[in-house]
Structures are given as structure tokens and as C-alpha cells.
Image: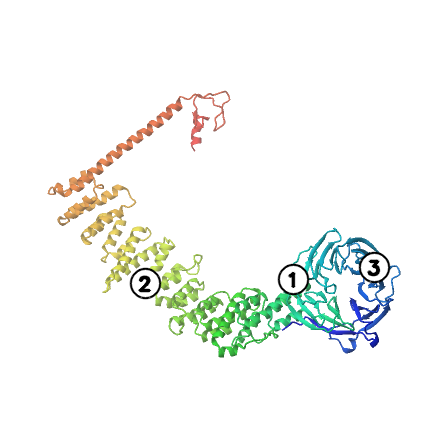
Amino acid sequence: MTLTAFTKVHVYEKQVAPKEKDKSSIQCLECYDRNVYIGTKDSVVQHFILPSSTNGDVNPGQSKTREGRVRKLGSSSPVTQMRAVPVFNHLLVLWDRCVSALNMFSLEPIPTLKKIQHVSLFEVCKSPFTAQSQSTCVEMVTSSSRRKVVRIHMVGVDRWEVVKEVPLPQDPVALAVDGACLCVATSDRYLLYDNKTGSSVELFPHNHSRQHVIVTSAGRGEFLLNGPGSLGMFVMETGICQRPPLQWPEVVLAAGVCFPYILTLQPQALSVYSMLDQQLKQTVSLSGARGLLSTSDGVLVFTERDIFSLSLVPLEEQIQALVGHERAEEALSLLDGVQSHLPLHSYKELHKAVTCLAGFVQFYQEAFSEARDLFIKGELDPREIISLYPDMEPCVGEAFQSQLDQVSKGRDLQVLRQEDRTTFHHYLDFLGDFLREVRGMEQGLRCSEEVDCALLRLYAEQGDTDNLQQLVASPNACRLDYCVSVLEQHNRFFALGLLYQNHGKQTDAIKTWVKIADGHHADPSCSDVYEHIVRTLSQWTDRDAVWTFADWALQRNQEIGVQIFTKRPPDDRVTFETEDVLAFLEKYPLALLLYLEFLIHDLNSEEERHHNLLALAYVTQTLKTLEKEEETESDAGETRGKLQQLLWDSVFYDISTVYERVEPTALHVEKAILLGRAGEHSQALQILVHTERDPRAAEAFCCRAAQGQDRPLRQTLLLTLLNIYLSSDHLTSAAADLLNNNPQVFAPERVIQLLPGSWSVQLVSQFLMGSLRETFHQRRMGGLQRGLAQAELLRHKITWTQASKTMFRVDKGQVCQVCQRDLTEPQFVCNLQGELIHTSCTGYTAS
């Protein structure tokens, strides 16, 4: 299918007597605005005026061409060329090898402009020779019929004169001029000449006959030539080609440019080619055509008797026609090519519309990636796409009116959903991709409610849990009156809670999730809804709402539920008072224990009550664990270890309070720790040795109690433990082990006095050897330290001796460097920098 770029209208038919047909045939045309001039074979110049519209849209009574004046020039020589100079109201006519000047409207000769004789061709430059001469003169180029030269004339209102003469290697057969550049065709080549610099460029040869040589202006600084091999060549005034050549028919009578098209005339037709892609766009039948003339909005084509106007169809209509026939790429190419010829606002709006229409073409061809990019580039209203999908109408609303009625809907998606589910799912995937892409863009923000509602319904129907939860959990514009029912319909209750929460309905959100956790709602998309409830409650600052659901959370799981209070934001210290939480947790012992650990270990509480409560909670938890029939030693050991660690490390609990709770129990190690913290080390060791019967625990107690203290305390504790062992006959081996394991701690002279006379040397040999080694080691280390101290003392004496032998000069007027007073006494002090100071000022310097 071809493009209708031009419309043809028959604007003139020359009525002549049968005998005069051959003599009065049309030879050339000239046109300015609606004024058309005909030059005939019998030396006649005729003026007529075209109707106000030549595109066939006017009324029949207004479409007649009005004839003006007629002038007979003289003999029967044909009129070969005419050019209008509207700035002077001149019509320049080439007739009988002479250029004459006529008035454009009366066709009377201009008496002050005498004929220019011996001219074979001429052309008028439409650009001024200089900026200053724009209103005073026009440039004209003539070709001599006697010599191989072209002459450049300056034409004024009442005079013309030759200003330059350019020699040529051959007689010119065609020429065109643009500004200062002249393009000439001879019998076998094309030339460029710059009439300002005088430089010339030979372009390329040709083998066309005189009738088929074509040289015409193709735009600013560009010429169109009939090149070799039936190629239309575009040549810039610099001699280079910036456009690809155009492949046109072998026989071309004439060619013209009406941007963005090239029109070539053949004997029976006129062909329209695009300058943008060099493709044939339209063919117009014209029998017997002889020539054409470019006008402001198209071309005039003439035969011997008739004149046809080919007017350019408005570019907007051409582009819409291309899109309507699904030639989207061609439409966009045309629009981009003519951008400079359209107002900026019109171009932008048209480009958006065409881009969107092209996107719909791709959409219905299932080229979804291309369609998405075109819709985004064209800033398409997302509601136009949403409204195409079945069941999505409520998302858009009845108030929306589509602005794309001209779109050819290639498929009914309602029918497609019923007949081809696979393809329909591809369309649904496209909808999701497109809406996600535009959601943060301006085109999506203009209708954010519709976009978010459509996405929510799409995710719910497709079971896209991740995207659905991400949508409802992040800031969104979903309408609750619509989206709640959609989520309930598809059993997306967890997402419903997130939607409630995001819209400030926290209580409704928690109630919805509680129903999921209690089994009243089935939602397989969430497996940890209980933990999510706890996390949410830990972020709330509404005290009453948290208290409402805290009981439910702790009844299900104390260990996780207590996180409502322990996982609160670091900057939230005012929502819940510590004492209120402690009172609330009294009926949940495990939660209370965990909360107290949080207060002490995380918040570094130094409250005595908190430390007492935690210690008592550890005691209670340990006793409960030990009393269970199915005793779990690991749990009991872990809790008991925490208790012992707290009793050793904390300095904030009340010893008597905790001891009162521990005393009647079997927690003997804890009793010993408390007695040790109270300074009753001997009693503590008695419990560990005789009641707990654990010598290792007793020895560990000594080490732990002396940790961070002086060495004598550890010696005293171990010596006390040794006495306890020695006082019982059955603890002899424990006493020997204690001595042998700690030879460096005990003083051997004291131990020997305590040992029974019945013990053999072999029994304590390891202790004796270790003790002697430690004694020798300490003695040698003492000697080494004394030697080092003596060396240091000697070094200081040397320094003092050297300093005392130094001479100082005290002049009259010498001042103390501290008080700045004169040194008048014989005693003075010298500091490390060699400065003299009063002896009474040394205390000041030391301070």
C-alpha cells in the first residue's frame, strides 16, 4: 500500500482553437503565492490566479481559476523560462534568447530594464547577495548563448548590471543557484562554483541528453542532480553528499523538492519519494506531462494544455494514516524527519500521540517489550491500558473517558481470555510490567489510585505473593473500598492486614492477622504470621492497642511474645514504663525472666530490685526444671549457670534477700557464692566440701573469689580449704591434690607446720618440688629486679654528675624564666632547657 502524500487537482485547462493547438502549447510555468504565469510556444505570457484552495475542499463555485492579463511578446519564439521577483513586482522572462522584465500584474515591460541579449539559461537567487542588499537588489545568473561563460547580475527595481563573469569548460545546459553557490551542468559533467571565493569543484560526469539533465535546489545549501545510473544525487555546496542517493526511473523529465519528499516527473506519471528513507511513497498518473514547478505547498505539473496542482497533505494527516495502517515505524520516522518544520508544542503532542498509537500496534501484535517502551515514551495514560482488560473496569471508574478512540483494537481481551488462556496470561504479564514501570513516573502518579488498584488485583489473581505484599506494605494509593473485597475474595488476608496497617488502621490489621494465627482465616502465603504480629506490636507506640493484644501474644509463646517489649526501637523509652511491664509480666514467669535479662544485660540497669528479681527468677526456674520428672539437665544447667554468673558478677542485688530464698533449697553452690560475697568464705567452703561434696567446686570457689584481688587473698582461701581437708580423715587425698595442684600459691614453711606427722615425703613430693622451684624463681627475679634498679640509679647519678659540672654565666640583669625577676641570690636552679630559675619558683614550674 502506498502513502497519499499529495492530492491532485486540475486547476487550469487552456482553451484554444483546434488550428492553434500546436502553436499555443504550454512551455513553462512560474508561480508566486496564488499567481501563476504560463509561457507558451507562440511567445505569449498569460497570468491567472488560483482559487484560495487547490486541494478540492472548497465549494465548486469558489474553485474556478481566474484569468488575468495576457501579453504577446513578439515573434513566434517560445517562452523558455520565467522567474518572479516579488520584492520588485518583476516577472523575468527568457524569450528569443533575451531576458526581459515585465510587471507581475500588468505584464507591461519595465522601460528602465533593457533586454539582456544572448542568454540561453538564467536563474534568480532567492537568497540575498548580502544582508544589506536584501531590499535593494537580487542576484541573477545568466548563461551566454555565444560564449562558455555564466554572468552574475545584480537586479534592482529599475536597473541591472553584470558584476562577475565565470568561464566554463563547456556550454551549460542546466543551472541552479543557492546563495553564493552556483551548480552548473554541462553536456557531460556537473560543476560547483562559489561566486564569493571564486573556487570551483568538479562533481561527477553524466551521460544524459540535454532534455534529461536535472539541476535543482533541494534546500539550504543543497542541490539535487540527475546522476549516473539513474540516481538522484544530493550534493551540498561543499561538494559532499550527506544523504544517500535516490534510485529513480531511467527517464526523468523534471524533479522538484517539497520537503520531506522528492517528486520526479515521467511522461505518464509523477513519483513521490521520501527524503528520509529514499523509498517510493506515491505514484500519481499524469498522461502527457511535460514539466513541473515547485511551490510553497507542493508542485504544479503541466502538459501542453492542462495544469495540475499537487498539494502536500498535512503532515499530521499523513502520520495518522500511517499509524492507522499499522506502519508505526514509518510514521515515527516521518514525524522525526519533519520535526524542524513543526512548532515545538505541536511536535511534542503529535509525537506522544503517534508513539502511543504505534505502541498499540505493537501491543496487539504481542510485541510487548516494544509496546511498553513506546507507551512510556508517549506518556500514555495508564488507564487507557487498564480499561482494555476484563474485570478491571472498577479500578478505572466510570468517569474515565478514553482519548484513543481511533486505536484499532486488534483483539478483544475478553474473548481472548475465554479462547486462549495462555496468550491472555502473556497480556496480563505485560500489564504488570507496564504498571510497575510507570508507577513512579509522572504519567503513573497522575492516576496513582487506578494504577495501584489494578496492580493489587493483578497480583491477587496471579498468586504473586511477593509483589502483592511489597505493594501493600509500601506507601500506596489503593482504595480500601475496592481492594479489601478483592483480597478477601482471593484469601489474601495477610496482605489485607498489611494494607490496613499502611493506611493507618493498625487495630484492623492485627485483628486480621490474629484470625489467621487462630485458624479462622486460611492464608497459605504467610507461615510466620504470629512472629509478624509480635514484630508489629513492638513497633507500635499506642499503649492501649499493645496491651490489648499482648496477653494473646504471651499466651501463645512467652519467649517470642516478650519481644513486644524487648525489641522496641532504641529511641522509644517512654511508651511503656518498666514497672508497668514488670507488673504485667508477673503471670508469665519465662517472659518476666527474659525481660529482666533485657533490662540488666541490654539496658545496663543498676536497679537493685531488677537484679533481685532476676536472681529470684533464675532460682525459681532452676528449681522447677530440676523438679520435673523428665529432667532436662541442659536446660537446668543453662539457667543455673546464668544464676551463678549473676551472683558472682552483679554488685546491685541484695545478698540477704537472695540468700533467704536459696537457703532452704539444694542449691549449695549458690549458697556458697552468696556467703563468699558476704565475706563468709570459711562457711562457704564448708558447704562446698561437706554438703556439696565437690572438692573441685571448692577450689574453683577460691580462684573465683580471689579474682581481681591481691595474691594473699587467694593464699588465705586455699589455706583455709587445706585446713578443712586436713580436719577430716577421709579428705586426705583431696588435701594432697590441693597442695600438688597449687605449689606456687602455698608458702612451704606454713604448709609443713600443718601437715600431719604421718604423711610421707613421697605424698607431697610434687608440692615440695614445685614450691622450691617457685621460691628459687621468686628469689632470682628479686635479685634481677634489684640489679635493674641499681643500674637505673647509677644512670641517674651519672646524669646528675654531668649536670653538676656544667658552668652557667649569670650576668647583671639576668632574670628568672618563671617570675621574670632579677637573679640576686647565689642559689638558682637550671631546668632541662638550660634556663635559670629561682629555687623558690621551682614549685610553680612543677605545678
Q: Nearer the viewer, residue 106 or 593?
A: 106
Earlier sequence position, callout 1 versus callout 2: 1
Point out the residue furthest to the left here: 758
- According to the picture, the residue beneath numbered tag 1 turns out to be 245
User: For numbered disc 2, what is the local secondary structure?
Assistant: helix
Image coordinates for residue 782, horizontal then vertical, percent: 26, 34
Q: Position of residue 540 (x, y in %)?
A: 44, 63
Under mark 3, the amino acid is His
Q: Are marks 1 and 2 in contact (CB under 8 Å)?
A: no
Residue 599: image location, x then y, percent: 37, 56
Q: Amino acid at mark 1?
A: Pro
Placement of the C terminus among the 4 image quadrants? top left
Q: Read off the residue under disc 2.
A: 589
**Is residue 337 rendered to the left or right of residue 42?**
left
Is residue 840 depicted above or below 535 in this figure?
above
Label 1 or label 3, whichever lies nearer to me, is: 3
Please tell me which residue lies in front, 575 or 445.
Answer: 445
* Number of other residues with Cα within 10 Å of mark 2, as a class: few under 14, some 14 to 19, many 20 or more: some
Label 3 neighbour load within 10 Å: few <14, some 14-19, many 20+: some
Q: In this rendering, is residue 138 above or below 796?
A: below
Rounded to the nearest angstrom, the CA distance separating label 1 from label 3 is: 36 Å
| Residue 768: image tag | none
Which image quarter: residue 447?
bottom right
21, 400: nearer the viewer: 21
Q: Quadrant of residue 121?
A: bottom right
Query: Could you tell which of marks 1 and 3 lies nearer the N-terminus?
Result: 3
User: Pointer 3: what residue?
Assistant: 118
- Disc 2 vs disc 3: which is toward the camera? 3
- The tag earlier along the polypeptide, 2 or 3, is 3
